[in-house]
Image: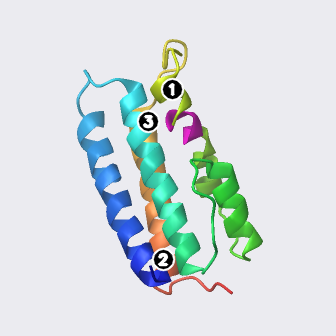
Amino acid sequence: MKWDEQRDQLLAKAADDQKAMLVLAADAGTADATVGFHAQQAVEKYLKALLCHLRVNYQKNHDLVMLLDAITDAGQPVPADVDNCKYLEPYAVRFRYDDIPVGEQNPLNRLTVQQDVECVRKWVMQIITGGVQHP
């Protein structure tokens, strides 16, 4: 698959996950782990779309730290508010599949999560559409 085609597919899938996160976050009956999962998936796919845009190969995993490091290694500075989204990583697998209670002592702040995902989306789209210089 060509870089731009893969980028566009990832952007579409990220938007779907972001949409699912918004719908589920509005329902108080939805578990934090589920909302966090879709937030993490959206961020992961936005970052992978950016890596495609930068023509950088990435490993097929859910490691947000590794993806952010790859973006930085490609010469694209990562803003602190985007880097902050690393806290979502455990929602990809650990909180989704392991028997670990989520939110008992530190519940997911759904408004913050929504804002953080949107921050990543805006940053990625700004770069892709040419609003930010990259190598």
Callout 1 secondary element = helix
In depth, the one of 3 and 105 nearer the eye is 3
Name the residue rendered at 45%, 31% in the picture.
109
Name the residue rendered at 44%, 63% in the picture.
121
**Type of amino acid under label 3:** Gly
Asked if residue 5 is positioned above or below residue 90 in the image, the reply reads: below
The part of the chain drawn in magenta is 88-92
Residue 95: assigned label = 1
Question: Outermost residue toward the front?
Answer: 1
Q: Which residue is mark 2?
A: 126
Asked if residue 55 is positioned above or below residue 91 in the image, the reply reads: below
**Type of amino acid under label 1:** Phe
Q: Is residue 13 magenta?
A: no
Callout 3 secondary element = helix
Mark toward the start of the polypeptide (3 vs 2)? 3
> Does residue 80 appear in this view?
no
Name the residue rendered at 64%, 75% in the picture.
56
Q: Which residue is mark 3?
A: 36
Residues marked 1 and 3 touching at CB (< 8 Å): yes
Asked if residue 66 is positioned above or below residue 112 in the image, the reply reads: below
Task: Give the number of the mark in front: 1 or 2.
Answer: 1
